[in-house]
Image (cartoon, rainbow, N blue to C red):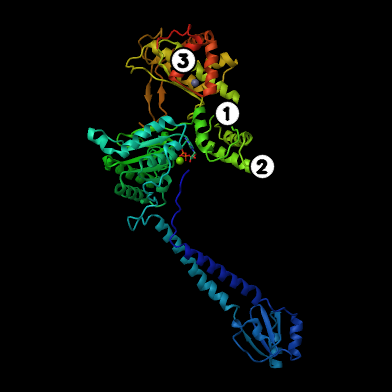
Amino acid sequence: MSLKLPDIKPFKGWKFSLVYILILIVGISLFNYLFMNKAQPTVDFSDFKRRIELGEIKRVEISDSYFTGFTTIRRELPPTLRFPSSSAESTTYRTVAINDPKILELMDQKGVAYYAVSREGNALLNILFSWVLPIVFFFVIWRFLMKRMGNMGGGILSAGQNKAVIIAEGDISTRFSDVAGVDEAKEELVEVVDFLKNPQKYTDIGGKIPKGVLLVGPPGTGKTLLARAVAGEAHVAFFRMSGADFVEMFVGVGAARVRDLFKQARTKAPCIIFIDELDAIGKSRINGIGGGNDEREQTLNQLLVEMDGFDSTKGLIILAATNRPDVLDTALLRPGRFDRQVLVDRPDVKGREAILKIHAKTVKLDSVDLSAIARMTSGFVGADLANIVNESAILAVRSGRQVVIQKDFEEAIEKTIAGLQKKSRILSDKERSIVAYHETGHALVAALTPGADPVQKVSIIPRGFGLGYTITLPVEDHYHITEQDLLTKVKVLLGGRAAEELTFGNMSTGAANDITRATDIVWKIITEYGMSARFKNVTLSSRRVSILGDQDQTTRFNREYSESTQQYIDEEIARIMDQQYAYVKELLSNNGDLLIAVAEELLKKETLGEQEFKDLLFSNNSHSFKKDN
Ligand code: ADP
Ligand code: MG
Ligand code: ZN
């Protein structure tokens, strides 16, 4: 839940009365225009002339478009200021003017008094258009500009106040218990809370307190919630600003705000500064789209300066959140800045159940199986789940029930899935099982091939652009890698596709990235490391020519070998790949039971940790599991 404090609008009352005045003025002028000029009906010109001849009309007012005849001689007010009723005692005839010189002669003959009035039929309207409206107009513009300057926090003129409002100690009621499904992130942040509570404990030993912690994860996974929980647990003040708040129209405003924020925070230490959506200001300065954005750059620089400048022993910690860590400027991630990154990932089945429990606490349930619901909501983030609980409560009310039942939840999930599928976050069952077998393939090949890095985690929860992932971690750092090691990597990469082919009989594009990476390794084996039969110990690799200098990603390869060599390389790559793929397929089909067992378990649990994975291997197929780790 993001608490957005309303902007303070200093002259709200003013603005309102101005609007009313404007409406009034326009109304009056419309009234004038409609009713004052056209109130009198016109008569035919011939009729008008006849009435002059008959002597009925004694006086004529000539304007550009009308002749107005009166039956009395007396002129009361200047006609332009007269209300229709004021000429009530005299009958008035009006006709549309015709340029007939004879009419003047006629009037002279009959002794009719006549005079002309200029066009501006209505003085009120005139004054309005030539004076009042422009003044009002300029006043409104002036007010608008002043307001903008005010919003800048007085930017140019004064140091300015900040939009961030200090929430005093104890005001934050969020606790870690309100957050679930992100246990690893929570563990790391517990430590931050401890820093904030007893900074001395750490500084006495000479330890360094982290300055900045960056929460990284997809939208809706609870990053903002976690930041609030840290402040709540530590009972410290909490300054929250969104990256977008810093980016203003005027250059320098963002930087002033950053300066101000830190100034305020220093007086309140120990406290937390939380910058939500850091990517709005922290985008890499190099490849900013649309050239350099001066304002953002200045803001970012100011942030870097402030982060370098403050003393973390005072208990000031900066938390930031982003879902685009890839676009962040590297300067932000350097030591002394956001040197700690905490991954806030999509929850797995157990996590989702825990989140559902938190949000269902305030809702009356009737025999609802939350763990079943957790199983139905693969790929959902915390915000989606909170939404589902809410939605099902609404559905229950709509059908006139006092309690929420399982059906409400199912309906709410269906609704949400439809929305999420458009954002391609939810996989169909078929796709899920393809992903599960694919990832199991990687993991099994890694586990069953001697020398491969042990499997840390297998998951079918989408992350980044991938639909699932398998993490293998080397036990120790490798400094020289043997040909065997490289081929093992290739095997693990091919494991995904091989498992798909064995299980479903065909291949999917999901493995495209694996294939690219495997091919790249084999290509290097032949051309760069000189490990091929024909070109033993010869580097065939070409010089890399960068077109645009260091920042250029699209390096061009200048081939420095003949056509026949190229052909040999291509054939050799294909041969090695074939060989490795055949090996992997053989390995997996020999362990078909294991493949099925692990994949099905993965479908159930979505994530398998190192131990869970190992346990599965041993319990299912210990005889063919020859690996020593
Ligand atoms: P983010 O900042 O990562 O986009 P938020 O923290 O704003 O996500 O989450 C929005 C809402 O979704 C929270 O207020 C909370 O109600 C719910 N929510 C999200 N993640 C969790 C979680 N891990 N545990 C409990 N509730 C969550
Ligand atoms: Mg957020
Ligand atoms: Zn893969």
Report x, y in % for residue 108. 68, 91
Instruction: Please indicate, yes or no, whether residue 491 appears anywhere in the rendered image.
Output: no
Inter-mark Cα distance, 2 to 3: 47 Å
Q: Is residue 269 above or below residue 577?
A: below
Q: What residue appears at the point 71 percent right and 80 percent down from the top-left corner?
A: 95
- Hey, what amino acid is under mark 1? Ala
Q: Which residue is mark 3?
A: 615
- State whether label 1 is within 8 Å of ligand 1: no
- Residue at 38 percent of width and 55 percent of height: 153
Q: Position of residue 615 (x, y in %)?
A: 46, 15
Relative to 586, 297 lies left or right: left
Who's the residue at 53% across and 7% down the image?
Answer: 590
Helix, strand or loop for disc 1: helix
Q: Can residue 256 be seen from the camera position used here?
A: yes
Q: Which mark is residue 399?
A: 2
Q: Is residue 271 left or right of residue 565?
A: left
Disc marking residue 530: none
Q: Quadrant of the C terminus?
A: top left
Circle number at residue 372: 1
Label 2 or label 3, whichever comes before in sequence order: 2
